[in-house]
Structures are given as C-alpha cells and as structure tokens.
Amino acid sequence: MNVGVLGGTGPAGRGLAARLASVGLDVTIGSRSVDRAKEICDELARAWPAFDLNLSAGDNATAASAEIVVVATPWDAAASTAASVADHLRGKVVISMANALAKVGDEFQPLVPPRGSVAASVQAIVPASRVAAAFHHLPAKELGQLDHPIESDVLICADDPSATEVTAELVRLIPGLRPLDAGRLSNAAPIEAFAAVLLQLNVRYKTRAAVRLTGIDIP
C-alpha cells in the first residue's frame, strides 16, 4: 500500500508519514517544494535509522498519485491544495486531518470553516473523491516519536462507508491506535473543534493528551 501525504513537511504530516512508514507502508511526502520534501525524508531517515523507513519525496501532485491520500496541510490550505490535485484524487479515499484553530491570547479556540468543518470543505471541492475525517486528536510530536507506541482512539467520519473502512484499516496498522466509526462527515465539525480542548489541556498540564473512550468493546 502506498500513502501520499499532502503538506507532509509540517509537524502533523511528517509525524504521520514517519509512523505509517514505520509499520511497512510506502509513503510519499508531498510539498509545494520537492526539495523541502526531500529534506524531511532525509531528516526522518537520519533520526530513525533502525526503522528503514520507505519514504519518498515529491510535489503534492506526486503524493496525490498514491492509493490513499492524506491532507495534512494547515487547515486554511486544505481545500485549495486538494483542488489543485483533484484529477489525481478522483475515486480515491482522501483523509482530512486538519483542525481549524486559532490561538487567542493564551487559549486555543476553534474556528468554523466553510461548510462547518475542514473535512466537509475538502469533500465539496473534490466531489469525485471519498473523503474521511480522521487523525485529528493525535499529538504531532508523539506521532513522530517512533521509539514508543502512541495510544489513542481515532474517530473517523465519512459519508461513504468504504472511506470509513479503508481509513480504519490504515489506523489498525499502527500499534496503539483504535479506529472508531463516528458517523457521517457532518460529525467532523465537533471532532475538529475538540482539538482546541486537547491542546489547552496539554498546555495546562504540560503533557500530550490523546483521546481514549471507555465502554466500547470491539472484537
């Protein structure tokens, strides 16, 4: 399986790319600058030589040619980036992981993007793709620390059941993560917004909290 990460040079994108590569996937880090993408691939290879990460660098169009594509750009660039490679995304599962947040004073506050969530905005701009919202609550730094597992539930929203299942299969490959079907894409709005609460808790308690729900038993 090959996964492309659009905007893969940012903290969340590079962290997820490294984590996916660490479990044996072929991952293409995409960026507007191929040179910048290559720098990140080289940095990750040097940082984690024991994992033999199968990472390649390319522009966003190259990353969008992968079987599964993750949009990891800043939230306000997610829809426009997806639009720029829409032809490559046709028919594919596209995973949106951005949260629309702003720091106001010493607090993080959720914003309301067009259509209510970043994921819904991406789906609107690439209607021929199957968009899922996922990976919103994973601390970027923890994602990239490959020497220990990351423990969290991953809430997945999508209007297409196959997008939910493909995303869940990807999540299951990463030890410590549990995929949960959180319903249709309209539910992405509160899920994205809750990231502001997590960030505030992490700042207040100087930790990297993630989400783990109790009372759900999955065979």
Image (tube, rainbow, N blue to C red):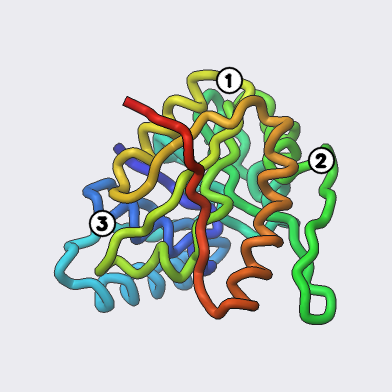
Q: Which residue is disc 1 drawn over? A: 160
Residue 115 is situated, as x and y percent measured from the top left of the image, at 83, 37
Q: Callout 2: 10 Å neighbours few (<14), some, many (20+)?
A: some
User: Which residue is at a point 27% across and 46% down the rendered structure image?
Assistant: 25
Q: From the viewer's perspective, is residue 127 above or below residue 50?
A: above
Which three-letter amino acid code belongs to the residue tagged 1?
Asp
Q: Callout 3: 10 Å neighbours few (<14), some, many (20+)?
A: many
Q: Residue furthest left?
A: 50
In the rendered image, the quadrant that contains the C terminus is top left
Q: Which residue is disc 2 drawn over? A: 116
Residue 143 is situated, as x and y percent measured from the top left of the image, at 41, 62
Q: Residue furthest front?
A: 215
Mark linked to residue 22:
3
Q: Earlier in the sequence, mark 2 or mark 1?
A: 2
Residue 137: image quadrant is bottom right
Q: From the viewer's perspective, is residue 216 above or below residue 18?
A: above
Q: CA distance from mark 3 to mark 1?
A: 28 Å
Residue 47 is situated, as x and y percent measured from the top left of the image, at 27, 77
Which three-letter amino acid code belongs to the residue tagged 2?
Gly
Residue 202: image quadrant is bottom right
Which three-letter amino acid code belongs to the residue tagged 3?
Ser
Left of 218 or right of it: where is 11? Answer: right
Asked which secondary structure carries label 2, the reply is helix
Left of 60 or right of it: where is 171? Answer: left
